[in-house]
Amino acid sequence: KCTRNCLLTHKLGEVRKVWSFFKVMLGKRFSEVLFLPPKFFKTLKFHGGKRMYLQHSNGQKWSVVVSDVNGSLAFQNGWSEFVKDHGIELGDFVVFHYIMGTSHFAAQIFDKSGCEKLASSTVKNYQNKRMKTTARDALYLQYPYGAFVLTPPAKKNPSVSGVSR
């Protein structure tokens, strides 16, 4: 398992700054659109129409588009698939870690009890579609609780690729 010492062990990739925020899934439309905090996108100078990737802690990626919705930025196209595939329910909350200089958000999903949802059976089915990664393609991200290895989107299927944690 890759831990905080991953960078020291592998001596590959580069460390990137990570900005985080969380959202509690509330309201009737939480599965259709997720509004980004205004402070977050103003600080990072986000703009609508940008394709991003949400990466679950199990390594799978989902493509979403950051859209301008009534003057606010939101995950819209692709968000409902992410919600469905992870069994996200009303009252769950998701912590998003944006990796500066990339189009990736690492996402941690927690249920109403406060425990992390590690993987659903739907997510496990994506294992067969995972792409192989070479070390030179990987980007290592160090978090206080461990490290993620992000891979660039695959050309054939940009919504799914492999990663280790």
Image (cartoon, grey):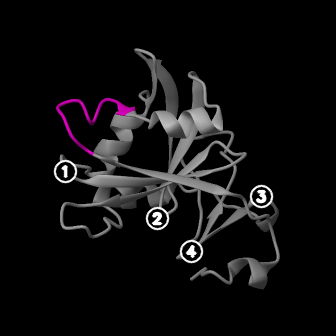
Asked if labels 1 and 2 touch by Cβ distance under 8 angstroms, the answer is no
Provide the secondary structure element on which disc 1 rests: loop
Q: Residue 79 lies in what quarter of the image?
A: top left
Neighbour tally class for label 3: few under 14, some 14-19, many 20 plus, Cα within 10 Å: some
Neighbour tally class for label 4: few under 14, some 14-19, many 20 plus, Cα within 10 Å: few
Task: Indicate the position of residue 134 as horizontal and vertical percent values.
Answer: 76, 64
Which three-letter amino acid code belongs to the residue tagged 1? Answer: Gly
Which three-letter amino acid code belongs to the residue tagged 3? Answer: Asp
The answer for how far apart the CA atoms under marks 3 and 1 are is 36 Å
According to the image, label 3 marks what residue?
137
Which three-letter amino acid code belongs to the residue tagged 4? Answer: Pro
According to the image, label 1 marks what residue?
91
**Mark sitting earlier along the chain (3/1):** 1
The boundaries of the magenta stretch are: 25-34
Provide the secondary structure element on which disc 4 rests: loop
Asked if labels 1 and 3 touch by Cβ distance under 8 angstroms, the answer is no
The answer for how far apart the CA atoms under marks 1 and 4 are is 26 Å
| Residue 49 sits above or below residue 29 on the image | above
